[in-house]
Image (spheres, grey):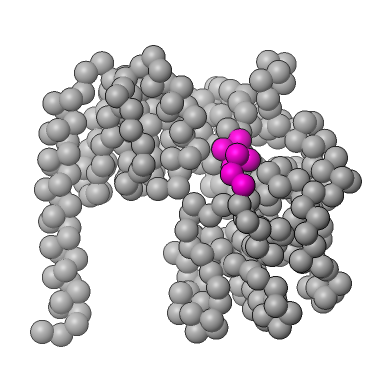
């Protein structure tokens, strides 16, 4: 039996097994479901950290459901977790749901498997998993089917208004703290020298910036980790074969803690804003091609990530990389901290500011 036939059989057996697991999980779910009118949709293992604050808050007074595609570490007596592995039953669940509210960090509602219920009762609420622009960093219709969108900074609030005006929608923006940041700040880790974490859909790998940086770090005994965006691997911007062939130290874990690194090198990713706000250190920004997922003309609108590159980040000129001391153990520089605090206080919502 050749390898291809063997792999096909293994995949078939796995799919059949998942199909029957889903049947069992759904039967068990319907037997337990009583007055559960709130659902949280958790697509990936790492997205639960963005939903966790809202889940815990709702669990205090309500019975809730968590639909998760991946296994998660969460338990509460007021919570039922439903795991579904097959696309057929995932789509079936979404189309037949009758919850009052469904919270999700997944955009593009009503596309692919993430469909709106045929019962038309459910209100859909989007929870942020990044501080970046809602206009340029997402597809054109990514948010148009949601009833409400969490906004964590003034840019996002204004962008929901722009989406409403351009598409004649009445999506409600609700101001909220970025609770994910608070969970990171509580973790104290040993610091490594450099985290390289570019976003996807740019020319970062095409221009071989990763190889230039890593070769320099290796020669100068600077510890580093390359963390490719999950979509960069899926879209084959970089392969595991290349990473292993070039003996690159990498980490594909979506739970990667930015608190562990002295320095961050990134491009147009929300991670460089998060790094600055958590570590009170300015990251290094490489001016690659910008990440635009739609071609709409927003009249030269400046996004928060574009503003952040000028205000809370150092521009990294790779030709002058040897002028930077990546081993500087001064964890917090006063001038940088003041600049970053001003950025956060001016733009991000807290319990006082969100009331205004």
At 46% from the left edge and 33% from the top edge, which residue is drawn?
52
Q: Residue at x 45, y 47 (%)?
A: 46
Q: Which sits in the foreground, 70 or 114?
A: 70
Note whether residue 149 is visible: yes
Residue 114: within the magenta?
no
For residue 347, side relative to residue 117 (left or right) = right
The quadrant of the rendering that contains the N terminus is bottom left
Q: Where residue 262 appears, x then y in whole percent?
A: 71, 58
Q: Work out whether residue 106 can be spotted.
A: no
The residue that appears at 20% across and 79% down in the rendered structure is 4
Asked which quadrant contains residue 319, the reply is: bottom right
Residue visible at 21% across and 18% down? 34
Task: Out of 311 and 126, give the one closest to the viewer.
Answer: 311
Q: Is residue 153 left or right of residue 327?
A: left
The correct choice, above or below, for 136 with respect to 227 in the image is: above
- What are the residue bounds of the magenta stretch? 182-188
Q: Please tell me in which quadrant of the rendered image residue 175 appears.
A: top right
């Amino acid at each position: 039996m050749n390898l291809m036939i063997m792999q096909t059989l293994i995949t078939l057996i796995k799919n059949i097994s998942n199909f029957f697991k889903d049947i069992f999980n759904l039967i068990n779910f319907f037997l337990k479901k009583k007055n559960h009118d709130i659902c949280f949709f958790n697509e990936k293992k790492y997205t639960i950290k963005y939903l966790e604050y809202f889940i815990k808050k709702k669990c205090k007074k309500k019975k809730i459901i968590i639909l998760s595609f991946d296994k998660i570490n969460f338990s509460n007596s007021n919570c039922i977790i439903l795991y579904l592995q097959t696309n057929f039953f995932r789509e079936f669940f979404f189309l037949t749901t009758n919850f009052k509210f469904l919270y999700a960090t997944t955009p593009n509602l009503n596309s692919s498997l993430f469909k709106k219920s045929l019962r038309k009762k459910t209100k859909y609420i989007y929870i942020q998993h990044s501080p970046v622009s809602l206009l340029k960093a997402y597809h054109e219709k990514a948010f148009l089917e949601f009833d409400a969108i969490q906004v964590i900074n003034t840019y996002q609030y204004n962008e929901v208004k722009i989406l409403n005006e351009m598409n004649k929608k009445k999506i409600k923006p609700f101001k909220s703290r970025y609770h994910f940041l608070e969970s990171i700040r509580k973790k104290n880790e040993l610091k490594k020298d450099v985290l390289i974490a570019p976003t996807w859909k740019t020319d970062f790998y095409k221009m071989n910036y990763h190889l230039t940086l890593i070769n320099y770090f290796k020669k100068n005994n600077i510890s580093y980790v390359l963390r490719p965006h999950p979509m960069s691997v899926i879209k084959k911007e970089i392969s595991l074969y290349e990473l292993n062939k070039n003996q690159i130290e990498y980490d594909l874990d979506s739970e990667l803690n930015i608190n562990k690194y002295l320095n961050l090198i990134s491009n147009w990713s929300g991670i460089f804003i998060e790094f600055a706000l958590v570590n009170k250190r300015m990251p290094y920004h490489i001016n690659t091609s910008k990440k635009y997922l739609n071609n709409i003309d927003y009249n030269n609108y400046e996004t928060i990530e574009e503003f952040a590159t000028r205000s809370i980040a150092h521009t990294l000129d790779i030709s002058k990389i040897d002028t930077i001391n990546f081993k500087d153990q001064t964890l917090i520089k006063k001038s940088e901290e003041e600049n970053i605090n001003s950025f956060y206080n001016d733009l991000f919502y807290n319990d006082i500011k969100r009331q205004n």
